[in-house]
Amino acid sequence: MHNFGNINNAFSEVLFESFIKKDAAKKKLFNTYLATIKESKILKTQYLIYKNISEKYDINDLKIGEYIKESISLMNSFKLNDIVSENKKLIKLIGETSKLLEYDYDVKELHENINNLIILGRTKNHKNINKIVESLDYIFNYIKNNKPVDEEQSINEGVANLAISKFNEKYGNLESDDFNTLKSIIDSSNDGKETTFKNTLGECVNLIDSKLTESDGETKDKLLKVKDKISKMSYNEETFIKDISKIIELKRNLN
């Protein structure tokens, strides 16, 4: 049975592919995934446990031990069968892209150990006590050697940053334009997309204005035509990806 961390990673791959391949169906699938988590107390609690432990950093042994214990205890109010059922709901949702569940990723072992504590902790016995202790030890050492994270993140932002990390691994560091574009695509509302569109468009207009003062003749005429064309552009959700890509490319050329 795949654990929640594994499932979350698979959906971050869905998001990543929706951005790279401009796949609207996968973007829709990812949004459904986010909505499913937010509607389920079990899934939301799981998400926060995996996220918080993954980002936790401390050097105090006592605090680390208590943090792990209290974090895992958040799942104690839910029945094991219900936890399994909710996770199966996500696996069913991922459907034909279930191969993504088999992908390897940086914190896969951490997620497996978190799952061990959540599941095996319910049925402690002489057969699994060693595995429970080993999982505690693994998570303890992970937290003690982890890099500190300063900002708290929403569910959207947490998954977004995982997808951004995957982009960086495969294609090198994201430039700020690409980062903002990906973040706006991830945004569940239109506000982030529209803000990104307007801001980037405004930056292009400012760059053209600055170059107009230095240009004359044919170059100046071309710049005026480009300015006139983009000044007439307006935000459209359906063509956002195509439009913002053109604007970012223009901005890079102007720079």
Image (tube, grey):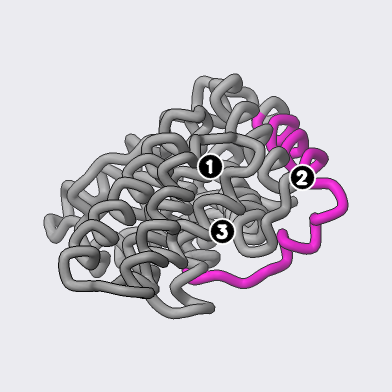
Residue type pointed to by label 1? Ile
Q: In the rendered view, does 196 fall on the left or right side of 33? A: left
Picture quarter containing residue 37?
top right
Count of marks overlaid on the render: 3
Q: In the rendered view, does 70 fall on the left or right side of 148? A: right
Disc 1: CA contacts within 10 A as few (<14), some (14-19) or many (>=20): many
- 3 vs 1, front mark: 3
Q: In the rendered view, does 78 fall on the left or right side of 223? A: right
Which residue position holds label 2? 25
Residue type pointed to by label 2? Ala
> For the residues marked 1 and 2, what is the alpha-carbon distance in whole angstroms?
33 Å
Asked if the magenta segment contains residue 254, the reply would be no
Residue type pointed to by label 3? Glu
**As drawn, 201 above or below 249:** above
Q: In the rendered view, does 96 fall on the left or right side of 83? A: right
Query: Which SS does the magenta portion mostly show?
Result: helix
- Residues rendered magenta in the picture: 83-106
Secondary structure at numbered mark 2: helix
Q: Spot the residue most to the right.
A: 96
Q: Spot the residue most to the front.
A: 217
Secondary structure at numbered mark 3: helix
> In the image shown, does 105 or 202 lie closer to the viewer?
202
Counting residues from the start of the chain, the first of labels 3 and 1 encountered is: 3
Which residue position holds label 1? 118
> For the residues marked 3 and 1, what is the alpha-carbon distance in whole angstroms?
10 Å
